[in-house]
Image (spheres, rainbow, N blue to C red):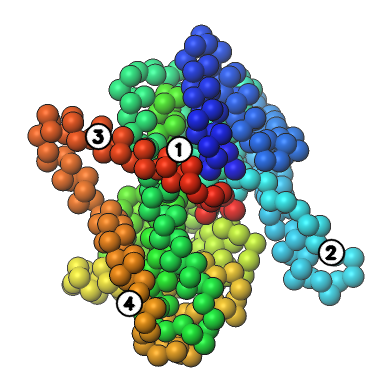
Amino acid sequence: MVFSSLLFMFIYLPVVLAVYYLVPSKWRNVWLFIVNLVFYGWGEPVYIVLMLFSITVNYAAGLLIARLKGDGSKAKRVLVACVVINLALLVFFKYFDFIAENLSFIPFIHPLGLTLPIGISFYTFQTMSYPIDVYRGDADVQKNYVRFGTFVALFPQLIAGPIVRYKDVANQLAFRANDREQFASGVRRFIVGLGKKVLLANNIGMLWDVYKSMPAGELTVAGAWLGIIAFSLQIYFDFSGYSDMAIGLGRMLGFEFLENFNYPYISKSITEFWRRWHISLSTWFRDYVYIPLGGNRKGLARQLLNILVVWALTGFWHGASWNFLLWGLYYAIWLTIEKLFLLKLLDKSKVISHIYALVVVIVGWALFAIDDFGDCVRYVGTMFGAGAAGFAGSDVLYYLRSYGPSLVVMIFACTPLGALAMKKLPKKAAAVAVPVLILIVLVISTAYLVDGTYNPFLYFRF
């Protein structure tokens, strides 16, 4: 994909930015709209048609809902039809083959071998938020098709988020300041994200690859934990790195996207973890599913049912595989237990609560990372001694020596300590240190890219 190629890094992006700042302000959205479609169609040009169809349906629905504002029942029917179309596209392209495989006993249902449109889970949620907000009165209708199309297909966050809601960028679509400090801040943020992905996530991902592919009979308890800890670090730096790059690119273009991560691994409960991890997705499900279902307003039993529904959907949103549904239900169970009694107990000890949260999250990543249900069960079983080839083998010591420094750096980087230390630096020292560090990260990341192979972001497959 473009984000992972040198072509994008050294040709596409500079050209996009150069033309963007050369054209008059009134033409910048037009340029971005064209760029967005070229970017999206880079891998699968045919899906540009799908993107334009999605844009057009939701744009038209917004106009109709605004026009029918005085007739609530008709406006609601338009909204329901629009949501059904959006979900039908998502289900067909992302889940049809999965459904067909599980209903293979029915003679006329067969998998179609569909290629998953890149980013469809993200932009479907973005587009759906617009007509819903117009219907609720939370957003004004957008009458300019190009502006709306620019919002839907905005290339910095199109592929893997953060999920940007129309009402959060509506004013920015009409006017963007584009000042130097914002641009410079965007460059810094982009390079930080690039470093997270290339220098941290890719390297620790190799350790996970070792243990993921290790035969079950050779895997030890310590090895299983080391492997899944490696994946836990990989997915955090990979996904938060993409979010940083998206936020940075947005700033270069004058947009301010909301944060998507807030040091999730310092959480002291699962409730807190999901306030810090993939914030845009958690917020979307809260505002458009959990609260409309009744949230916590209709009694405890209904609240727990709502949690179950939301997390079943959250798990399945991530992919057409039973392990994702299991992963979602796993979190539903833990969140239910916390709501019932565990949160009060966790307040008694910050250390125990932090250890608890980390263990639950790390085990959860095993459910998430391993698609095959049998392999997943065996791996988690090995983590707790079932079928393990002993507690630890020579491989664990070898990989701890090899990856030890990287693990220490990444664990430190999962906390806000580094950012706090930078803030305490004298202004003159920070003025020198920050640009030097950013330049070093850029140079080393570029060297890795030149020497490396294609390695897409993990969330591209969602």
Q: Nearer the viewer, mark 4 or mark 2?
A: 4
The residue that appears at 51% across and 72% down in the rendered structure is 212
Label 1 and label 2: CA atoms lie apart by: 38 Å
Is residue 184 placed above or below 261 in the rendered structure? above
Q: In the picture, residue 108 is in which quadrant?
A: bottom right
Q: Position of residue 439 (x, y in %)?
A: 31, 35
Disc 3 marks a residue whose amino acid type is Val
Mark identifier at residue 436: 3
The local secondary structure at tag 2 comes to loop
The local secondary structure at tag 4 comes to helix
The local secondary structure at tag 1 comes to helix
Label 3 and label 1: CA atoms lie apart by: 22 Å
Disc 1 marks a residue whose amino acid type is Ala
The residue that appears at 65% across and 62% down in the rendered structure is 320
Is residue 138 placed above or below 105 in the rendered structure? above
Q: Which one is in front, 106 or 344? A: 106
Residue 267 in view here: no
| Residue marked by disc 2 | 110
Task: Give the class, few, some or many, for how many residues have Cα within 10 Å of label 2's Cα (few <14, many ≥20).
Answer: some
| Residue marked by disc 4 | 397
Q: Is residue 154 left or right of residue 406?
A: right
| Residue marked by disc 1 | 246
Marks 1 and 2 in Cβ contact (< 8 Å): no
Q: Nearer the viewer, mark 2 or mark 3?
A: 3
Of pointers 4 and 2, the one earlier in the residue sequence: 2
The local secondary structure at tag 3 comes to helix
Q: Which one is in front, 66 or 222? A: 222
Q: In the picture, residue 82 is in which quadrant?
A: top right
Disc 2 marks a residue whose amino acid type is His
Label 4 and label 1: CA atoms lie apart by: 37 Å
Disc 4 marks a residue whose amino acid type is Leu
Q: Is residue 213 left or right of residue 77?
A: left
